[in-house]
Amino acid sequence: MSTMNNSAKHILVTLAILASIAINGCSEDSSPVAPTAPAAPVPMLDANFEPTVQSVFSVIGDTDKAIVFTVLQTGTLDRVELLLSAFPSSNVLLIDIRRTVNGVPVNDDAAVSAVTLVQPPDTSATGVWFKADLKSSQLAVTMGEVLAISAQSAGAWTMIGTFSDADPASTGYFRNPGQSINTWTVLGFDVGFRVYATPDS
């Protein structure tokens, strides 16, 4: 009888252990799982032109430059990048985004939609993509909208472009009040640029 009791006890203990494992396992498996938060949208490359041949070097100084482009996705403007050369002695570069009228940048500098400054590099830079951060402007852009990037400085910046592989989706402009060219005029060649926007979720 005692042997029977000991055997029974062993069996009960074993069953209890197995039951405990099963219950704990079931409890862990059935616990609610917190939903995964959707990933925050990230800036994506929008309108852009990257010349395969860098054959034109156009100074930004007395002459202001602008690039007209068409927005490819609805969202919020994040930044633009321009293909430039500059030196430590270069002056600060003023970048703005402005509306266009019939495909031509508006001339009024007080009517820009977003603006930022780009500092000169610590060392001489040739053919480098300089970033102009415009995220703080929170500028909403709409697919199909025609905008312009304007670049102005007191000097020593060079915009890089090409004659050989023209970009049909963008147009370069310039103006030079010192030479009585007071309104934006077609530049005649295309320059390197990238636009980044965060698409609407």
Image (cartoon, rainbow, N blue to C red):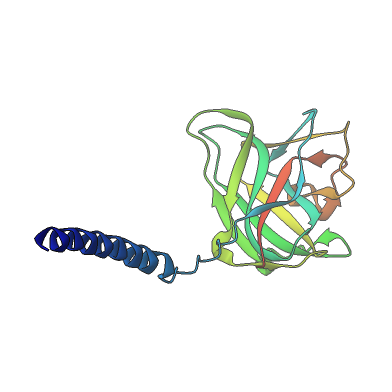
- 87 or 171: which is nearer to us? 171
Quadrant holding the C terminus? bottom right
Please give left or right for residue 74 compared with residue 36 in the image: right
Query: Please, which residue is most extreme toward the front here?
Result: 1
Q: Is residue 51 left or right of residue 34?
A: right
Q: Is residue 184 visible?
A: yes
Which residue is more in the foreground, 161 or 197? Answer: 197
Q: Residue at x 55, y 46 (%)?
A: 92
The quarter of the displayed image where residue 116 is located: bottom right
The front one of 63 and 85 is 85
x, y percentage for residue 56?
Answer: 79, 31
Please state, as top left, top right, bottom left or bottom right, where the N terminus lies in the image. Answer: bottom left
Q: Is residue 113 left or right of residue 70?
A: left
The one nearer the camera, 48 or 23, is 23
Considering every residue shown, the one lying at the far left of the view is 2
Residue 128 screen position, x and y as percent: 63, 33
Q: Is residue 145 above or below residue 54?
A: below
Residue appearing at x 72%, y 44% in the figure: 193
| 163 is higher (above) or lower (below) than 11 | above
Q: Residue drawn 75% across and 52% down?
A: 177
Task: Give the residue drawn at x 64%, y 67%.
Answer: 139
Residue 155 appearing in the image: no
Q: Position of residue 2 (x, y in %)?
A: 9, 61
Q: How many marks?
A: 0
Residue 182 found in image quarter: bottom right
State the image coordinates of residue 96 (x, y, percent, origin top left): 65, 57
Looking at the picture, does residue 34 appear above or below residue 82?
below
